[in-house]
Image (spheres, rainbow, N blue to C red):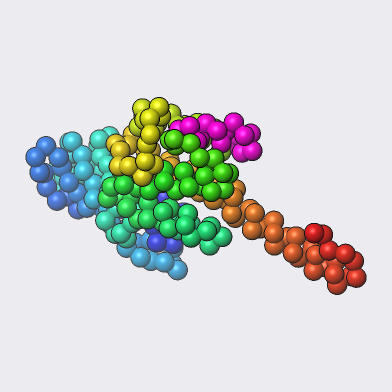
Amino acid sequence: MKCPHCQVEVNVDFSEKYIGKYGNIFYSLFYMRCPNSECDKPIVLLGQANNANQYHDGTISIKEQHSCNFKQLFPVGSGRMPAAPEVESKFAEDYNEACLVLPFSPKASAALSRRCLQNIIRLKEGIKERNLKTEIDKLIATNKLPSYISDNLEIIRGFGNIAAHGMEDQASGEILDVEPNEAEFLLDVLELLFDLYFVQAAKAAKMKAALNQKLTSAGQKPIP
């Protein structure tokens, strides 16, 4: 896993503290410190499962249960990095907020991500239709995108909520139910689009500026 503090890949070595059962759900706290010596910050998760294991020494654990799932308690947030500095603020703000609320409300996170995606399509490509699904269709049809991005956009347009609302007017920021992993997937695709439209464009501009500086220093005409 990546440490949610420093984003360095680390080995998972959580200690478990069983809390108890509430209703039909068993709860435990899982905690560790980041093994990266430059970080060494605590990571705390809340685990819940439908069953638990009880051992001979009396300890109870849920970590071996297939039904066990986790929610990050500390640090607060999803642990995702903020948008790259090259990304324009009107897009970065929605993305960063979607990352922040992801652990607490995947529905709200997905709504912010869909709005961000729609704004990218409208403002960067000039495509504006009655709903996000149609806008994604038109963007893919331009054949401007690398296949790894267009393939992932195909997955987004096939999500149940977007597909179901595809034939009627839809506000991209509407709070809709989300499918498992949909909110996280939307953020992953936004990262790909940010890299395409902003990060790589800025990198290319810097390369061109450096080349023109060399040409000018050599008394040659810069590239327009």
Which residue is at the far left? Answer: 23
Asked if 168 appears above or below 49 in the picture, the reply is above
Q: Is residue 222 left or right of residue 160?
A: right
Residue at the (70%, 62%) spot, across then down: 206
Residue 133: x %, y % from top left: 45, 33
Residue at the (23%, 46%) spot, across then down: 47
Q: Main secondary structure of the magenta part?
A: helix
Q: Is residue 113 left or right of residue 72?
A: right
Asked if 74 appears above or below 18 in the picture, the reply is below
Total tally of numbered discs in the picture: 0
Asked if 217 appears above or below 99 in the picture, the reply is below
Which residue is at the far bottom? Answer: 217
Looking at the picture, tell me which residue is in the foreground, 81 or 30.
81
Residue at the (64%, 58%) spot, across then down: 202
Asked if residue 25 lies in the magenta stretch, the reply is no
Which residue is at the far right? Answer: 219
Looking at the picture, tell me which residue is in the foreground, 161 or 189.
161
Res 107 → quadrant: top left
Looking at the picture, tell me which residue is in the foreground, 192 or 11.
192
Q: Which residues are magenta?
A: 133-148
Q: Quadrant of the C terminus?
A: bottom right
Q: Is residue 114 visible?
A: yes
Q: Is residue 190 visible?
A: no
Residue at the (53%, 62%) spot, across then down: 85
Q: Is residue 71 left or right of residue 167?
A: left
